[in-house]
Amino acid sequence: MTLKLQRNDAEPTHAASRRHWTVEEARALYDAPFNDLLFQAHCVHRENFDPNRVQLSRLLSIKTGGCPEDCGYCSQSAHHESGLKASKLMEVQRVIDEARKARNAGATRYCMGAAWRSPKARDMDAVVAMVEGVKALGMETCMTLGMLDIDQARRLKQAGLDYYNHNIDTSERYYGEIITTRSFADRLDTLANVRDSGIKVCCGGIVGMGEEAVDRVDMLVALANLPEHPESVPINMLIPIDGTPLAGSAPIEPIEFVRTIALARILMPKSHVRLSAGRTAMSDEMQALCFFAGANSIFVGDTLLTAGNPGEDKDSALFRRLGIAPMEIAAS
Ligand code: SAM
Ligand code: DTB
Ligand code: SF4
Protein backbone atom coordinates (compact mmCIF):
# COMPACT_ATOMS: atom_id res chain seq x y z
CA MET A 1 0.00 0.00 0.00
CA THR A 2 1.23 3.50 -0.80
CA LEU A 3 1.38 5.81 2.18
CA LYS A 4 -0.79 8.89 1.46
CA LEU A 5 0.58 12.38 2.02
CA GLN A 6 -1.03 14.87 4.33
CA ARG A 7 -0.27 18.48 5.02
CA ASN A 8 1.93 19.52 7.90
CA ASP A 9 0.96 23.05 8.88
CA ALA A 10 3.30 23.38 11.82
CA GLU A 11 6.59 24.56 10.39
CA PRO A 12 8.83 24.82 13.44
CA THR A 13 11.07 27.83 14.04
CA HIS A 14 14.26 26.85 15.75
CA ALA A 15 15.85 29.89 17.32
CA ALA A 16 13.11 30.40 19.91
CA SER A 17 13.44 26.92 21.40
CA ARG A 18 17.17 27.00 22.07
CA ARG A 19 18.64 27.36 25.57
CA HIS A 20 21.90 26.24 27.11
CA TRP A 21 21.74 22.78 28.71
CA THR A 22 24.17 21.50 31.30
CA VAL A 23 25.14 17.84 31.29
CA GLU A 24 23.76 17.54 34.84
CA GLU A 25 20.33 18.83 33.84
CA ALA A 26 20.20 16.51 30.87
CA ARG A 27 21.40 13.53 32.92
CA ALA A 28 18.67 14.14 35.50
CA LEU A 29 16.06 13.96 32.74
CA TYR A 30 17.61 10.83 31.23
CA ASP A 31 17.64 9.09 34.64
CA ALA A 32 14.14 10.19 35.69
CA PRO A 33 11.44 7.56 36.25
CA PHE A 34 10.52 6.33 32.77
CA ASN A 35 6.91 7.53 32.95
CA ASP A 36 8.01 11.02 34.03
CA LEU A 37 10.55 11.24 31.21
CA LEU A 38 8.09 10.00 28.60
CA PHE A 39 5.31 12.28 29.82
CA GLN A 40 7.55 15.34 29.62
CA ALA A 41 8.93 14.37 26.21
CA HIS A 42 5.45 13.73 24.85
CA CYS A 43 4.16 17.09 26.15
CA VAL A 44 7.08 18.88 24.45
CA HIS A 45 6.33 16.91 21.30
CA ARG A 46 2.64 17.88 21.29
CA GLU A 47 3.47 21.54 21.92
CA ASN A 48 5.58 21.60 18.78
CA PHE A 49 4.26 18.98 16.35
CA ASP A 50 1.20 17.03 15.34
CA PRO A 51 1.91 13.84 17.34
CA ASN A 52 0.27 11.63 14.71
CA ARG A 53 2.40 12.68 11.75
CA VAL A 54 5.79 11.22 10.86
CA GLN A 55 8.08 12.52 8.11
CA LEU A 56 9.34 9.98 5.54
CA SER A 57 12.84 10.14 4.10
CA ARG A 58 14.41 7.77 1.59
CA LEU A 59 18.11 6.99 1.33
CA LEU A 60 20.25 6.10 -1.67
CA SER A 61 23.91 5.19 -1.65
CA ILE A 62 25.26 7.12 -4.64
CA LYS A 63 28.83 5.88 -4.05
CA THR A 64 29.28 2.72 -2.06
CA GLY A 65 32.28 1.32 -0.18
CA GLY A 66 36.04 1.83 -0.37
CA CYS A 67 35.94 4.72 2.12
CA PRO A 68 39.33 5.85 3.52
CA GLU A 69 37.84 6.61 6.98
CA ASP A 70 37.96 3.94 9.69
CA CYS A 71 34.56 4.38 11.40
CA GLY A 72 34.28 1.23 13.52
CA TYR A 73 30.59 0.66 12.76
CA CYS A 74 30.65 1.07 9.00
CA SER A 75 30.33 -1.56 6.27
CA GLN A 76 31.83 0.90 3.78
CA SER A 77 35.23 1.52 5.36
CA ALA A 78 38.21 0.19 3.36
CA HIS A 79 39.81 -0.60 6.74
CA HIS A 80 37.35 -3.43 7.46
CA GLU A 81 36.57 -6.75 5.77
CA SER A 82 32.78 -6.46 5.51
CA GLY A 83 32.69 -8.15 2.10
CA LEU A 84 30.97 -5.14 0.54
CA LYS A 85 31.85 -4.48 -3.10
CA ALA A 86 32.96 -0.88 -3.73
CA SER A 87 31.30 0.98 -6.58
CA LYS A 88 31.86 4.19 -8.53
CA LEU A 89 29.69 7.30 -8.27
CA MET A 90 26.25 6.50 -9.69
CA GLU A 91 25.02 8.05 -12.96
CA VAL A 92 23.04 11.25 -12.41
CA GLN A 93 20.00 10.05 -14.37
CA ARG A 94 19.79 6.83 -12.35
CA VAL A 95 19.74 8.80 -9.11
CA ILE A 96 16.90 10.97 -10.41
CA ASP A 97 14.94 7.90 -11.55
CA GLU A 98 15.32 6.29 -8.12
CA ALA A 99 14.23 9.52 -6.43
CA ARG A 100 11.08 9.63 -8.57
CA LYS A 101 10.17 6.11 -7.44
CA ALA A 102 10.68 7.12 -3.81
CA ARG A 103 8.51 10.21 -4.26
CA ASN A 104 5.75 8.13 -5.83
CA ALA A 105 5.88 5.81 -2.82
CA GLY A 106 5.35 8.73 -0.39
CA ALA A 107 8.85 9.92 0.59
CA THR A 108 9.18 13.71 0.81
CA ARG A 109 12.94 13.89 1.39
CA TYR A 110 15.62 12.18 -0.67
CA CYS A 111 18.95 11.63 1.06
CA MET A 112 21.97 10.74 -1.07
CA GLY A 113 25.00 9.29 0.69
CA ALA A 114 28.57 8.78 -0.53
CA ALA A 115 31.34 6.80 1.14
CA TRP A 116 33.87 9.63 0.97
CA ARG A 117 36.08 11.41 3.47
CA SER A 118 35.10 14.52 1.50
CA PRO A 119 33.98 15.15 -2.09
CA LYS A 120 36.76 15.63 -4.67
CA ALA A 121 36.64 18.65 -7.00
CA ARG A 122 36.02 16.32 -9.95
CA ASP A 123 32.87 14.90 -8.32
CA MET A 124 31.15 18.20 -7.63
CA ASP A 125 29.50 18.71 -11.06
CA ALA A 126 27.74 15.34 -10.88
CA VAL A 127 26.66 15.84 -7.28
CA VAL A 128 25.28 19.30 -8.11
CA ALA A 129 23.34 17.83 -11.06
CA MET A 130 21.84 15.21 -8.72
CA VAL A 131 20.64 17.90 -6.30
CA GLU A 132 19.12 19.94 -9.13
CA GLY A 133 17.40 16.91 -10.65
CA VAL A 134 15.91 15.63 -7.37
CA LYS A 135 14.83 19.13 -6.36
CA ALA A 136 13.01 19.48 -9.70
CA LEU A 137 10.87 16.48 -8.69
CA GLY A 138 9.48 18.57 -5.83
CA MET A 139 11.31 16.65 -3.12
CA GLU A 140 13.44 17.98 -0.30
CA THR A 141 17.08 17.15 -0.97
CA CYS A 142 19.65 15.89 1.52
CA MET A 143 23.23 14.76 1.00
CA THR A 144 25.87 13.17 3.17
CA LEU A 145 29.27 13.24 1.50
CA GLY A 146 31.74 13.57 4.39
CA MET A 147 33.62 16.75 5.23
CA LEU A 148 32.78 19.93 3.28
CA ASP A 149 34.69 23.18 3.00
CA ILE A 150 32.75 26.42 2.82
CA ASP A 151 33.01 26.69 -0.99
CA GLN A 152 31.61 23.20 -1.48
CA ALA A 153 28.80 23.93 0.95
CA ARG A 154 27.93 27.17 -0.86
CA ARG A 155 27.90 25.39 -4.21
CA LEU A 156 25.52 22.73 -2.90
CA LYS A 157 23.27 25.39 -1.40
CA GLN A 158 23.14 27.19 -4.73
CA ALA A 159 22.16 23.93 -6.45
CA GLY A 160 19.15 23.69 -4.13
CA LEU A 161 20.39 21.38 -1.37
CA ASP A 162 18.01 21.63 1.58
CA TYR A 163 19.79 19.47 4.19
CA TYR A 164 23.26 18.11 4.83
CA ASN A 165 23.68 15.07 7.08
CA HIS A 166 26.87 14.97 9.11
CA ASN A 167 26.68 13.12 12.41
CA ILE A 168 28.77 13.67 15.53
CA ASP A 169 27.99 9.98 16.16
CA THR A 170 28.83 9.85 19.89
CA SER A 171 30.26 11.91 22.74
CA GLU A 172 33.53 13.78 22.29
CA ARG A 173 35.02 11.53 24.99
CA TYR A 174 34.12 8.28 23.22
CA TYR A 175 34.77 9.50 19.67
CA GLY A 176 38.38 8.27 19.49
CA GLU A 177 37.28 4.73 20.40
CA ILE A 178 35.15 4.59 17.25
CA ILE A 179 36.99 6.67 14.62
CA THR A 180 40.68 7.61 14.44
CA THR A 181 40.98 9.10 10.93
CA ARG A 182 39.18 12.33 11.84
CA SER A 183 38.29 14.18 15.03
CA PHE A 184 35.15 15.39 16.74
CA ALA A 185 36.41 18.94 16.00
CA ASP A 186 36.59 18.13 12.26
CA ARG A 187 32.90 17.22 12.41
CA LEU A 188 32.04 20.54 14.07
CA ASP A 189 34.00 22.45 11.40
CA THR A 190 31.92 20.90 8.61
CA LEU A 191 28.71 21.53 10.54
CA ALA A 192 29.68 25.20 10.83
CA ASN A 193 30.37 25.40 7.07
CA VAL A 194 27.00 23.81 6.32
CA ARG A 195 25.21 26.22 8.66
CA ASP A 196 27.06 29.25 7.31
CA SER A 197 26.14 28.35 3.73
CA GLY A 198 22.42 28.37 4.64
CA ILE A 199 21.85 24.62 4.24
CA LYS A 200 19.75 23.03 7.01
CA VAL A 201 21.63 20.70 9.33
CA CYS A 202 20.86 17.02 9.88
CA CYS A 203 23.07 15.81 12.71
CA GLY A 204 22.77 13.01 15.23
CA GLY A 205 24.53 9.84 16.17
CA ILE A 206 24.54 6.13 16.89
CA VAL A 207 23.74 4.34 20.12
CA GLY A 208 24.62 0.77 21.00
CA MET A 209 28.33 1.07 20.23
CA GLY A 210 29.42 0.05 23.73
CA GLU A 211 29.16 3.63 25.00
CA GLU A 212 27.78 4.46 28.43
CA ALA A 213 24.67 6.47 29.28
CA VAL A 214 26.90 9.47 29.99
CA ASP A 215 28.08 9.38 26.35
CA ARG A 216 24.53 9.35 25.03
CA VAL A 217 23.67 12.32 27.26
CA ASP A 218 26.88 14.19 26.31
CA MET A 219 26.20 13.63 22.63
CA LEU A 220 22.69 15.08 22.89
CA VAL A 221 23.89 18.02 24.99
CA ALA A 222 26.57 18.73 22.35
CA LEU A 223 23.84 18.82 19.69
CA ALA A 224 21.48 20.92 21.81
CA ASN A 225 24.23 23.45 22.58
CA LEU A 226 25.25 24.02 18.95
CA PRO A 227 24.72 27.68 17.96
CA GLU A 228 21.45 26.49 16.35
CA HIS A 229 19.69 23.19 16.79
CA PRO A 230 20.00 20.80 13.87
CA GLU A 231 16.68 20.80 12.01
CA SER A 232 16.92 16.99 11.86
CA VAL A 233 18.42 14.74 14.54
CA PRO A 234 18.86 11.14 13.40
CA ILE A 235 19.23 8.65 16.23
CA ASN A 236 20.64 5.43 14.80
CA MET A 237 20.70 2.14 16.66
CA LEU A 238 23.89 0.34 15.67
CA ILE A 239 23.36 -2.26 12.96
CA PRO A 240 26.18 -4.68 13.75
CA ILE A 241 28.06 -5.46 10.52
CA ASP A 242 30.19 -8.59 10.24
CA GLY A 243 33.86 -7.78 9.68
CA THR A 244 33.71 -4.38 11.44
CA PRO A 245 35.29 -3.76 14.86
CA LEU A 246 31.81 -3.20 16.37
CA ALA A 247 30.28 -6.40 14.99
CA GLY A 248 30.16 -7.94 18.47
CA SER A 249 28.75 -4.95 20.39
CA ALA A 250 26.08 -5.85 22.91
CA PRO A 251 22.70 -4.50 21.74
CA ILE A 252 21.44 -1.43 23.58
CA GLU A 253 18.69 -2.14 26.06
CA PRO A 254 15.42 -0.94 24.40
CA ILE A 255 14.32 1.23 27.34
CA GLU A 256 17.69 3.03 27.22
CA PHE A 257 17.12 3.63 23.51
CA VAL A 258 13.68 5.14 24.16
CA ARG A 259 15.19 7.33 26.89
CA THR A 260 17.68 8.63 24.32
CA ILE A 261 14.86 9.56 21.93
CA ALA A 262 12.91 11.25 24.73
CA LEU A 263 15.91 13.30 25.81
CA ALA A 264 16.56 14.38 22.22
CA ARG A 265 12.94 15.56 21.99
CA ILE A 266 13.12 17.57 25.23
CA LEU A 267 16.51 19.15 24.46
CA MET A 268 15.63 20.03 20.85
CA PRO A 269 11.87 20.67 20.92
CA LYS A 270 11.42 21.85 17.34
CA SER A 271 13.81 19.47 15.58
CA HIS A 272 12.65 16.44 13.65
CA VAL A 273 13.98 13.48 15.64
CA ARG A 274 14.56 10.59 13.24
CA LEU A 275 14.17 7.00 14.36
CA SER A 276 16.93 6.10 11.97
CA ALA A 277 19.02 2.94 11.40
CA GLY A 278 18.21 -0.25 13.28
CA ARG A 279 14.42 -0.46 12.99
CA THR A 280 14.50 -4.01 11.58
CA ALA A 281 15.74 -5.15 14.98
CA MET A 282 13.03 -3.22 16.87
CA SER A 283 9.61 -4.53 17.80
CA ASP A 284 6.53 -2.57 16.77
CA GLU A 285 6.01 -1.79 20.45
CA MET A 286 9.49 -0.31 20.78
CA GLN A 287 8.92 1.87 17.72
CA ALA A 288 5.54 2.94 19.11
CA LEU A 289 7.24 4.03 22.34
CA CYS A 290 9.80 5.97 20.30
CA PHE A 291 7.01 7.80 18.44
CA PHE A 292 5.33 8.57 21.76
CA ALA A 293 8.65 9.84 23.13
CA GLY A 294 8.94 12.30 20.23
CA ALA A 295 10.45 10.57 17.21
CA ASN A 296 8.73 11.97 14.12
CA SER A 297 10.77 10.93 11.12
CA ILE A 298 11.88 7.59 9.66
CA PHE A 299 13.71 6.20 6.66
CA VAL A 300 11.38 4.25 4.39
CA GLY A 301 12.24 1.55 1.87
CA ASP A 302 13.83 -1.84 2.35
CA THR A 303 17.43 -0.62 2.34
CA LEU A 304 19.23 2.21 4.09
CA LEU A 305 22.65 2.73 2.46
CA THR A 306 23.89 -0.86 2.56
CA ALA A 307 21.88 -2.42 5.38
CA GLY A 308 18.26 -3.49 5.70
CA ASN A 309 15.20 -1.48 6.73
CA PRO A 310 11.62 -2.72 7.39
CA GLY A 311 10.17 -1.87 3.95
CA GLU A 312 6.95 -0.21 2.88
CA ASP A 313 4.43 -2.95 3.69
CA LYS A 314 5.61 -3.31 7.28
CA ASP A 315 5.72 0.44 7.83
CA SER A 316 2.27 0.99 6.29
CA ALA A 317 0.86 -1.69 8.59
CA LEU A 318 2.56 -0.17 11.62
CA PHE A 319 1.31 3.33 10.77
CA ARG A 320 -2.22 1.99 10.34
CA ARG A 321 -2.12 0.26 13.71
CA LEU A 322 -0.83 3.42 15.40
CA GLY A 323 -3.06 5.89 13.53
CA ILE A 324 0.03 7.69 12.22
CA ALA A 325 0.00 9.48 8.86
CA PRO A 326 2.96 10.66 6.79
CA MET A 327 3.88 14.34 7.01
CA GLU A 328 4.05 16.43 3.89
CA ILE A 329 6.75 19.00 3.14
CA ALA A 330 5.99 22.02 5.30
CA ALA A 331 5.41 25.33 3.53
CA SER A 332 8.49 27.54 3.85
N1 SAM B 1 30.54 9.18 4.66
C1 SAM B 1 29.64 10.12 5.18
C2 SAM B 1 29.84 10.39 6.63
O1 SAM B 1 30.32 9.56 7.35
O2 SAM B 1 29.49 11.49 7.05
C3 SAM B 1 28.20 9.75 4.95
C4 SAM B 1 27.69 8.35 5.06
S1 SAM B 1 27.68 7.62 6.67
C5 SAM B 1 27.27 5.98 6.28
C6 SAM B 1 26.26 8.32 7.50
C7 SAM B 1 25.98 7.90 8.91
O3 SAM B 1 25.38 6.62 8.94
C8 SAM B 1 27.13 7.77 9.88
O4 SAM B 1 27.55 8.99 10.38
C9 SAM B 1 26.52 6.90 10.97
O5 SAM B 1 25.95 7.71 11.96
C10 SAM B 1 25.45 6.10 10.24
N2 SAM B 1 25.81 4.67 10.17
C11 SAM B 1 26.73 4.12 9.37
N3 SAM B 1 26.82 2.79 9.57
C12 SAM B 1 25.93 2.48 10.55
C13 SAM B 1 25.57 1.27 11.21
N4 SAM B 1 26.14 0.11 10.92
N5 SAM B 1 24.61 1.31 12.15
C14 SAM B 1 24.01 2.50 12.44
N6 SAM B 1 24.33 3.67 11.86
C15 SAM B 1 25.27 3.67 10.93
C1 DTB C 1 21.98 8.68 9.36
O1 DTB C 1 22.13 9.21 10.48
N1 DTB C 1 21.65 7.42 9.16
C2 DTB C 1 21.61 7.11 7.76
C3 DTB C 1 21.86 8.51 7.12
N2 DTB C 1 22.15 9.32 8.22
C4 DTB C 1 22.83 8.66 6.03
C5 DTB C 1 22.54 6.05 7.38
C6 DTB C 1 22.30 4.75 8.12
C7 DTB C 1 23.26 3.77 7.58
C8 DTB C 1 23.00 2.41 8.14
C9 DTB C 1 23.98 1.42 7.69
C10 DTB C 1 23.99 1.11 6.23
O2 DTB C 1 22.96 1.15 5.55
O3 DTB C 1 25.09 0.83 5.74
FE1 SF4 D 1 33.19 6.39 5.36
FE2 SF4 D 1 30.96 7.56 6.29
FE3 SF4 D 1 31.34 4.90 6.56
FE4 SF4 D 1 32.81 6.56 7.99
S1 SF4 D 1 30.57 6.32 8.10
S2 SF4 D 1 33.57 4.78 6.86
S3 SF4 D 1 33.08 8.27 6.58
S4 SF4 D 1 31.09 6.02 4.67
Image (cartoon, rainbow, N blue to C red):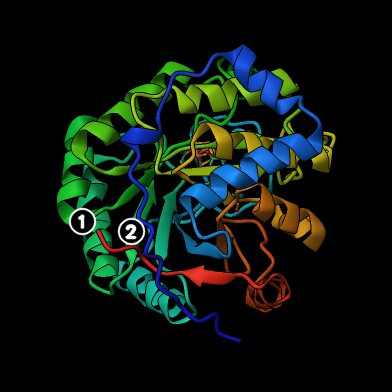
* In the displayed structure image, the side of residue 249 where residue 155 appears, left or right: left
Mark drawn on residue 141 = 2
Q: Quadrant of the C terminus?
A: bottom left
Residue 314 is situated, as x and y percent measured from the top left of the image, at 71, 74
* Residue drawn at x 21%, y 32% as measured from the top left: 196
* Residue drawn at x 41%, y 66% as measured from the top left: 8
Q: How many marks?
A: 2
Using the rendered view, name the quadrant where residue 131 is placed: bottom left
Residue 30 is situated, as x and y percent measured from the top left of the image, at 71, 27
289 vs 114, nearest the viewer: 289
173 vs 308, nearest the viewer: 173
Q: Can residue 193 be seen in this view?
A: yes
Q: In which quarter of the image is the N terminus?
A: bottom right
The residue pinned by badge 1 equals: 160
37 vs 118, nearest the viewer: 37
126 vs 99, nearest the viewer: 99
* Residue drawn at x 49%, y 36% as measured from the top left: 268
How far apart in space, not on screen, are marks 2 and 1 (Cα)?
Answer: 8 Å
* In the displayed structure image, the side of residue 265 where residue 108 appears, left or right: left
Amino acid type, residue under disc 1 in the picture = Gly
Q: On screen, 316 above or below 109? A: below
Using the rendered view, name the quadrant where residue 111 is placed: bottom left
Crowding around mark 2 (Cα neighbors within 10 Å: few <14, some 14 to 19, many 20+) is many
Using the rendered view, name the quadrant where residue 18 is placed: top left
* Residue drawn at x 23%, y 39% as measured from the top left: 153
